[in-house]
Image (cartoon, grey):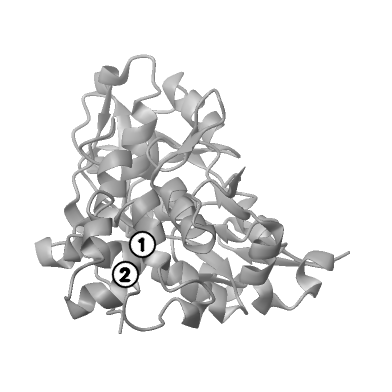
Amino acid sequence: MKKTLFAFGAAIGLIVSGPALAQNPAQTLKAVKDRGILHCGVSTGLAGFAIADQQGNWDGLDVDFCRALSAAIFDDPSKVKFVPLSAKDRFTALQAGEVDLLSRNTTWTQSRDTSLGMNFASINFYDGQGFIVHKKLNVKSAKELAGATVCTQQGTTTELNLADYFRANNMKYEPVVFATNDETIKAYEAGRCDAFTTDMSGLYAERLRFAKPDEHVVLPDIISKEPLGAAVRHGDDQWFDLVKWTHFAMLTAEELGVTKANVAESLKSTNPELKRLLGTEGKFGEAMGVTNDWVVRILKHVGNYGESYERTVGMGSRLKIARGQNALWTKGGLQYAPPIR
């Protein structure tokens, strides 16, 4: 098996050529249908985004997206195999065809989009990197972290942003780097570092796991842009379109007020936008290789974007993250979908 090594910053990915990629890349949807199950790469465990309970049942915003895609294809949100992937292994798994997509709190960057053989389909969560510190240090701002030891995970944009932030602010620090998220968290909680850095959503999620959450403080500083979203392999525009428009459909449904509870009633609407969204007018589903009621399938099984957000990371969840930038554009946020027409 031939391997070509690609490196960007501290992150390394392997492009694997062999049986998994020898097939025509524009066959992903057919392969998923023939297999009867979607293979979705997710986090190894991040509350609110992708985490499994003791019975192996997965839950989270990224999980909901995979279930929505499964619903669009099969009219069944359960036809998903969730494949937990570390930050180090996620790109290799997608490149090698081990998963059909990544839905795994992964930041969209230029190098990843252009050098790793992958396309980012959409942004399902606008995030930014921050810091959590031990409360006893009495630190109120990241600017007070000069000389601090900072725990971070290897092979992530987090590690690169950390270095950029301290260099830009002419501050010294000591990075303490670990291969996995769990190792990083345990080291920080055990006091091996003054601070731990990752995306703000991750900080709130990980704090829930601490033995004494109240002894840790999330600092207000946001030091980067972290647009998180699903990614697919280069070379299959049909699959890219379906994954991309699954997110847009969930956004459009929220904007038009269509929910899991009222989708059946909404099918009677004469509103042209609703008719196109729900498939009673036009053949927008067929153009992507699914049925024209693909959005109805998503909504009846999973719900719209707002429903998924509130249930998994929003006010209806343990994380209680306000919509903020992830609100619809009509409500001051950044979530905006092109029209279905």
Q: Residue at x 36, y 34 (%)?
A: 205
Drawn side of residue 33 relative to residue 193, left or right: right
**Mark 1 = which residue?**
296
Q: Residue at x 62, y 61 (%)?
A: 100
* Residue type at tag 2: Leu
> Which residue is most to the front?
268
**Which quarter of the image is occupied by the N terminus?**
bottom right
Drawn side of residue 236 relative to residue 286, left or right: right
**Which quarter of the image is occupied by the C terminus?**
bottom left
Residue 144 vs residue 76, the one in the foreground: 76
Tag 2, which secondary structure?
helix
Q: Is residue 46 visible?
A: yes
Residue 83 vs residue 43, the one in the foreground: 83
Are dots 1 and 2 in contact, CB under 8 Å?
Answer: yes
Q: Position of residue 128 (x, y in %)?
A: 31, 52
Q: Is residue 117 above or below residue 183?
A: below
Sequence-first disc among 1 and 2: 2
Q: Is residue 113 above or below residue 211?
A: below
Give residue 216's mark: none
Q: Residue at x 44, y 55 (%)?
A: 68
Q: How far is the residue under mark 1 from the one under mark 2?
A: 6 Å
Q: Position of residue 18 (x, y in %)?
A: 84, 68
Res. 150 image quadrant? top left
Crowd tier of the residue under label 1, counting other residues whose Cα lies within 10 Å: few below 14, some 14–19, many 20 or above = many
Q: Is residue 72 above or below residue 273?
A: above
* Residue type at tag 1: Val
Res. 36 image quadrant? bottom right
Drawn side of residue 93 relative to residue 286, left or right: right
Res. 146 image quadrant? top left
Give residue 278's mark: 2
